[in-house]
Image: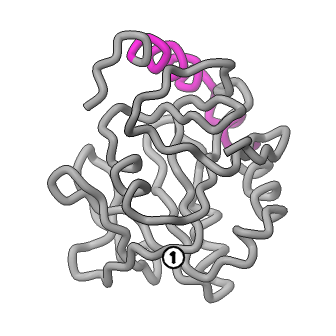
């Protein structure tokens, strides 16, 4: 768990900002992000895609998951195992169950595959250079340190900030997709 006081402060401010976004605005922003996401060739060409199931005020990914499944893509969601995550294949939403942190995650019997073409990474805040602020548990940073893949952050425009202190273990994100734009980071 990251206990950098500056990161904690930024996280708190950005979560409050995001949590204050109405459901209707989140739905509209999520639809716009879904459309823009398809413009990234690495995403549209990918066969094995890691996606997260949204919690709280995160960008809604259910439509993305459904679309990918209907196109015959292989869809994997993270499952927490001790201090790490493994991505497990789902075939539909009935493959999910409530897991750690009350997050919907694949059932234990789902096939594990950590060599993915693309991973959509949940984001609390991010800089244009791809320094991402998550929830401070480090699950994605540990996973991405071990597995080379294209990373895409789905986030609201207002969650992009000039500066986030970068820790040694923080993994940079390749792409940022907001309701307004698609950004290739300078990674």
Query: Which residue is disc 1 drawn over?
Result: 75
Rendered position, 119 above or below 102: below
| Residue that lies at the very extreme toward the bottom in this rendered image | 72
State the image coordinates of residue 53 (x, y, percent, origin top left): 46, 56
- Which one is in front, 92 or 78? 78
At horizontal 46% and vertical 79% (from top left) the residue drawn is 92
Specify whether 108 is left or right of 49: left
The residue range painted magenta reads 8-29
- Give how far across and how far down residue 41 sits, in percent: 79, 69
Image point (55%, 72%), residue name: 49
Q: How many marks?
A: 1
Q: Is residue 169 left or right of residue 3?
A: right
Instruction: Point out the residue furthest to the left here.
Output: 82
Front-most of residues 122 and 66: 122
Quadrant in the picture for residue 126: top right
| Residue 10 horizontal side relative to residue 153, left or right | left
- Rendered position, 39 above or below 47: above
Q: Is residue 26 magenta?
A: yes
Protein image colouring:
one colour
Q: In the rendered image, which quarter contains the N terminus? A: top left
Question: What secondary structure is marked by label 1?
Answer: strand
* Residue 40 position in % (x across, y down): 79, 62
Majority secondary structure of the magenta segment?
helix
Above or below residue 116? Residue 72 is below
In the picture, which quadrant includes the C terminus?
top right
Residue at x-position 34% and y-position 51%: 142
- Image x and y of residue 117, in percent: 58, 73
**Residue at figure coordinates x 50%, y 20% from the top left:** 165
Residue 80 within the magenta-colored segment of the rendering = no
Packing grade of label 1 (10 A; few <14, some 14-19, many >=20) is many
């Amino acid at each position: 768990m990251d206990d950098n006081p500056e990161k904690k402060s930024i996280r708190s401010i950005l979560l409050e900002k995001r949590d204050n976004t109405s459901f209707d605005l989140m739905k509209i922003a999520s639809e716009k992000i879904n459309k823009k996401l398809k413009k990234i060739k690495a995403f549209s060409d990918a066969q094995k895609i890691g996606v997260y199931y949204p919690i709280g005020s995160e960008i809604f990914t259910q439509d993305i998951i459904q679309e990918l499944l209907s196109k015959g893509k292989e869809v994997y969601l993270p499952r927490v195992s001790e201090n790490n995550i493994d991505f497990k294949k789902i075939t539909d939403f009935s493959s999910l169950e409530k897991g750690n942190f009350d997050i919907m995650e694949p059932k234990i019997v789902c096939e594990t595959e950590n060599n993915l073409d693309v991973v959509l990474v949940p984001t609390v805040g991010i800089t244009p250079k791809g320094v991402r602020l998550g929830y401070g548990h480090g699950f994605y940073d540990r996973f991405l340190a071990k597995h080379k893949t294209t990373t895409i952050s789905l986030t609201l425009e207002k969650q992009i900030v000039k500066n986030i202190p970068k820790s040694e273990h923080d993994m940079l994100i390749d792409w940022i997709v907001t309701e307004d734009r698609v950004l290739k980071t300078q990674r």
